[in-house]
Image: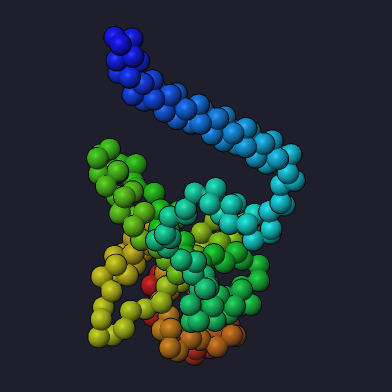
Amino acid sequence: MIFAYLLLALLPIAGVAYIIWDHRRKAAALEASSASRLEELLVVAAHAPRPEPSDEDAALAAAAAQPAAPAATFALRDKFLTAPQTLLYYLLKTGLPEHLVFAHVPVASLLDPAPSLAPYAREEQARMFARHVVDFAIFDKSTRPVAVVNFSAPVDAPHAAGLQMKSWFTAAHLRYVELDPTALPRKDAVRALVLDEHSAAGGSAADAQITH
């Protein structure tokens, strides 16, 4: 009788143990099956041919690899000379074929501070020269400066820098010529105005403001 009671008491425990064991067996089998399926998929993917990237994809990848260019803070000028400067340039080139004509020449390329100045004064004068540019400079074939040609400022707006440059070149004994951009001289008068050859120009030299 005691054995029968013990057997009846152990039956529920055995049933629970069997259920737990069976659940674990099925879970292990399912996990093994999943692992085997994943391994098969990886093998297939490894041997599958990779699609070639399209031109568009390649362009996008190349663009992504390039660093972004910073926004430009400057722009290329359309022309080096303005319309009046261009016309005067050709007048000078035609009227002075044996000379060199350069545009936008820094004053510092034409004048040096006087050696007699103190070092500090020389540096200050050099900085002042570097801040000013003339419209045209005329040179002989050896590149010796012969004359400076500038456009004159409007009558109602006198240009202080132009007056200052005129005094510099006058003191340096370099011919300085100012021309009205709205009333340029005739082709046959340019040489007389620039080189002070009054006989070649007749009365046309009166059209320009000239400083010797």
| Residue toward you, 49 or 171 | 49
Q: Where residue 90 sits: x, y (%)?
A: 59, 78
Q: Where residue 101 sits: x, y (%)?
A: 57, 66
Image quarter hosting the N terminus: top left
Is residue 102 positioned above or below 93 on the image? Answer: above
Q: Where residue 23 sits: x, y (%)?
A: 45, 30
Residue in view at x 61 percent, y 73 percent: 93
Residue in view at x 33 percent, y 19 percent: 8
Q: Which residue reaches farthest top?
A: 2
Residue in view at x 51 percent, y 86 percent: 185
Q: Is residue 36 left or right of residue 4?
A: right
Is residue 9 positioned above or below 24 on the image? Answer: above
Q: Where residue 62 sits: x, y (%)?
A: 60, 51
| Residue toward you, 69 or 75 | 69
Q: Is residue 160 visible?
A: yes
Quadrant of the image occupied by residue 17: top left
Is residue 160 positioned above or below 67 on the image? Answer: below
Q: Is residue 173 visible?
A: no
